[in-house]
Image: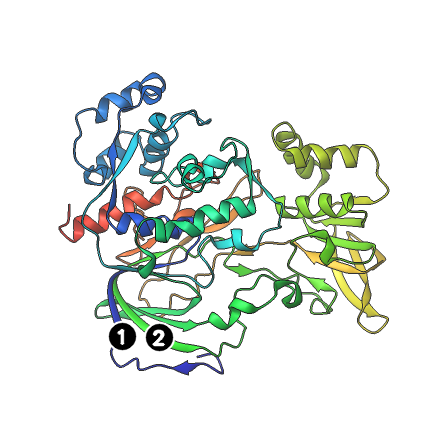
């Protein structure tokens, strides 16, 4: 137990049939579906034109699609995540609601609880103010509530096929629990600290971290949600459940550089907007899309940026060239680098060796290392955009530990995924444990499939419970 926690009466833990851990896009998608909103087939002219075999397959299927034999579908070469992706997005651009080959109808709900350590929306709560998604906004939507429908209901006006900014996406995610009548099943600011075996299935220990609600991430120098090393002063509660969906996300635990001086006050792991970085000289450490965004925006705000990457120049430019045609900020970073701006220096095959303070602790000197060569540069700020990793350490005491496989691609997506049964996404090691979203083995960085595990997992549990 973390020092400072207050223990509630846990002699009789609160029992739920299902507990979902994580309120990001992968976890949040479960709330309406477990709350009874089930997918049914909706005849779509677009689906018929583009995937006639799929359309013909479901034309006479009048029951909820959760009743499908997912294992047989997989045997026929159609994984559940791909099936529901095609039904939801038979074409990439949105032209109208009739193209979606799904409709959702209210059925009987199942008892569940969703626990999340921050507001629903996950990492989107902590990204830069003006950050654009990597795809049309409607790729980030849930099938049960199209972004176009959300725009109409809220009286807004924007093109759902455009790249969407953070606040619009958060507005969409934040409205989901209330919109689908499951707000009472979602407990925000609740950090799960341990998941153990129990005679009921699982014993979940969690801490109330609502005091973090008022923490300023700029002052904190990292996103305002707790990490494993933080002291938590809130009340501890315990829950039991028969089934557990583990959807904590691939960036649940922030990474560290593990170098001397990393904790100095001019070093931060949070970037929202340039105004939070007074001064001129900034080192951005990273190499992923968030680092590309920060380096570009800080440069355009007049800062002198040294962009330090461990990856090669060829790898970085591979992504730039793949993305510059469709993503404006990649066209911009290409323009800056190709134009030879004196205010953005990209340094490849290089790592941070040490960070030291000067003038008290107001600014510093960063030592860079590339092969046998070292170099020192003076800085006003060091911005760490080095991402995070999935945290499986919460699972403790199980006879069989989770088997993990490394998943990565050329777009810098990397995560250790848990091995699962591919028709249900149930763990092959821990019965009734379901890794959600990208934590399930085999899921790649396909934005329009990020919540595709939802339907197979919900179907598997509902069948086990005799509700289908």
Q: Which quadrant of the rendered structure holds the N terminus?
A: bottom left
Is label 1 in a helix, a strand or a loop?
loop
Comparing 379 with 42, the one in front is: 42
Q: Is residue 267 positioned above or below 340 on the image? A: below
The residue lying at 49 percent from left, 82 percent from top is 3
The residue lying at 34 percent from left, 16 percent from top is 49
Mark 2 touching mark 1, by CB under 8 A? yes
Q: Is residue 320 visible?
A: yes
The residue lying at 56 percent from left, 55 percent from top is 126
Q: Which mark is residue 122?
A: none
Q: CA distance from mark 2 to mark 1?
A: 7 Å
Q: Residues within 10 Å of mark 2 (few under 14, many from 20)?
A: some
Name the residue at the front extreme.
155
| Residue 313 image point, x, y percent | 72, 39
Q: Which corner quadrant of the image does residue 61 belong to?
A: top left
Q: Is residue 249 positioned above or below 3 on the image? A: above
Q: Residues within 10 Å of mark 1 (few under 14, many from 20)?
A: some
Q: Which quadrant of the rendered structure holds the C terminus?
A: top left
- Name the side, left or right, on which 439 lies relative to 18: right
The residue lying at 49 percent from left, 33 percent from top is 160
Is label 2 in a helix, a strand or a loop?
strand
Of pointers 2 and 1, the one earlier in the residue sequence? 1
| Residue 23 image point, x, y percent | 41, 56
- Name the side, left or right, on which 333 lies relative to 58: right
Residue linked to disc 1:
13
Q: Is residue 227 visible?
A: no
Residue linked to disc 2:
237
| Residue 119 image point, x, y percent | 46, 59
């Amino acid at each position: 137990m973390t020092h400072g926690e207050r223990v509630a009466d846990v002699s009789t833990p609160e029992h739920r049939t299902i507990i979902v851990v994580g309120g990001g896009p992968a976890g949040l998608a479960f709330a309406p579906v477990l709350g009874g909103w089930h997918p049914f087939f909706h005849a779509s002219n677009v689906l018929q034109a583009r995937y006639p075999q799929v359309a013909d397959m479901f034309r006479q299927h009048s029951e909820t699609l959760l009743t499908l034999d997912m294992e047989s579908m997989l045997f026929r070469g159609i994984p559940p995540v791909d099936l529901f992706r095609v039904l939801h997005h038979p074409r990439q651009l949105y032209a109208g609601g009739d193209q979606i080959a799904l409709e959702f109808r209210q059925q009987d709900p199942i008892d569940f609880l969703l626990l999340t350590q921050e507001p629903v929306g996950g990492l989107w709560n902590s990204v830069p103010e003006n950050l654009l998604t990597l795809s049309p906004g409607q790729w980030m939507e849930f099938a049960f509530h199209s972004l176009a429908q959300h725009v109409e209901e809220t009286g807004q006006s924007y093109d759902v096929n455009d790249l969407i900014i953070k606040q619009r996406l958060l507005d969409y995610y934040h409205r989901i629990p209330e919109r689908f009548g499951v707000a009472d099943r979602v407990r925000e600011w609740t950090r799960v600290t341990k998941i153990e075996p129990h005679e009921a299935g699982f014993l979940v220990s969690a801490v109330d971290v609502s005091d973090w609600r008022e923490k300023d991430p700029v002052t904190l120098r990292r996103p305002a949600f707790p990490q494993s090393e933080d002291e938590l002063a809130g009340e501890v509660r315990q829950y039991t459940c028969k089934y557990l969906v583990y959807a904590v996300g691939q960036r649940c635990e922030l990474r560290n550089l593990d170098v001397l001086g990393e904790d100095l006050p001019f070093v931060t792991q949070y970037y929202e907007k340039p105004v939070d970085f007074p001064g001129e000289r900034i080192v951005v450490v990273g190499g992923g899309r968030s680092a590309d965004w920060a380096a570009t925006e800080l440069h355009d705000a007049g800062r002198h940026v040294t962009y330090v990457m461990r990856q090669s120049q060829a790898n970085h430019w591979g992504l730039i060239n793949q993305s510059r045609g469709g993503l404006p900020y990649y066209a911009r970073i290409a323009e800056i680098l190709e134009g030879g701006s004196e205010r953005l220096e990209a340094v490849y095959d290089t790592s941070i060796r040490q960070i030291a303070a000067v003038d008290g602790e107001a600014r510093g000197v960063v030592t860079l290392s590339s092969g046998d060569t070292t170099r020192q540069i003076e800085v006003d700020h060091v911005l760490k955009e080095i991402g995070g990793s999935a945290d499986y350490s919460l699972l403790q005491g199980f006879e069989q530990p989770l088997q993990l496989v490394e998943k990565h691609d050329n777009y810098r997506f990397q995560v250790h995924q848990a091995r699962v049964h591919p028709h249900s996404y149930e763990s092959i090691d821990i019965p009734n444990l379901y890794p959600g979203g990208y934590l399930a083995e085999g899921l790649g960085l396909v934005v329009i499939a990020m919540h595709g595990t939802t339907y197979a997992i919900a179907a598997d549990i509902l069948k086990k419970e005799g509700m289908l």
